[in-house]
Image: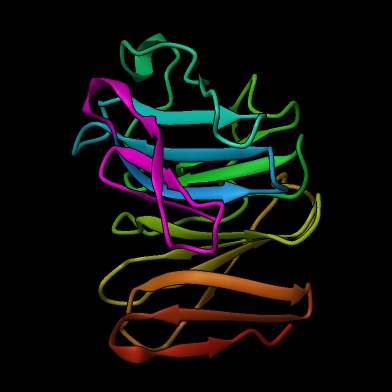
Amino acid sequence: GYAQGGGIVIKTVDGGSVWNVVLDSAHGNYLDALHFVNGREGWAVGGGGMDNFDPSAIYHTSDGGISWEDQQPLKQGWEYGAISGGLGAVSFYDAHVGWATGIFPFGDIMMVVKTTDGGKHWAYTGPSNDVSYRAEDSFRAIESFDSTFVLIGSCASKYPNIYESTDGGATWSRGRIDDPRPVRSISCSDPRHCWSCGDSGRIWKYVP
């Protein structure tokens, strides 16, 4: 098992009796989310800053946490190619196709990035012209059940939203939750049966 907190990832191989640090992130990066697709391939994401100009953190392991590579292309800010603003959630369908979503939107770009090569390259894929997102949206929940179906949850304090794509992030639709509780996690057993958890003990069921 693995867990993340602060700037570290810890691992246990004995059911939780003993935990060891397997990643101590550089540059003071705070790690917000962790996802493994099997016992060896995993990603940890987060960020080192508190606004949308600070670079995010993306780390990948292919050997069960023994070694990690920094998958951020550059660390000099969004205008130089880095993914900025901090990443709050990550989900991979397999060892190649995955998504990460962020805390701060950047201008008219919703902070959703996608990779199809295991994290070697990332590209923005969030809604632009096909659906408008709310400026107060920040994203700390994502679920990718297969290579095309993705749900993203908003932590907006007034009216949280869940954004859905059924074509791998090419187009999106938005569904509002009429309950002012931020969405913290999403889980699906299949694309028609999904649940989300939020603040104050709220649980929502997805209705296709």
| Residue pictured at 67% horizontal, 42% vertical | 98
Number of numbered discs overlaid on the protein picture: 0
| Residue pictured at 45% horizontal, 42% vertical | 111
Q: In which quadrant of the rendered view does residue 60 lie?
A: top right
- Is residue 9 magenta-colored? yes
Q: In which quadrant of the rendered view does residue 24 lie?
A: top left
* Colour convention: rainbow
- What's the magenta region? 1-29
Q: Quadrant of the C terminus?
A: bottom right
User: In this view of the protein, can residue 124 be seen by the observer?
Assistant: yes
| Residue pictured at 30% horizontal, 21% vertical | 26
Horizontal and vertical percent position of residue 114: 63, 36
User: In this view of the protein, can residue 128 be seen by the observer?
Assistant: no
Judge from the rendering whether residue 172 lies leftward or rightward of residue 189; answer left or right: left
Horizontal and vertical percent position of residue 39: 69, 46
Q: Nearer the viewer, residue 176 or 22?
A: 22
Residue 184, above or below 48:
below
Horizontal and vertical percent position of residue 40: 69, 38
| Residue pictured at 75% horizontal, 31% vertical | 116
Residue 10, above or below 121:
below
Q: Quadrant of the N terminus?
A: bottom right
Q: Nearer the viewer, residue 17 or 111?
A: 17
- Is residue 195 magenta-colored? no
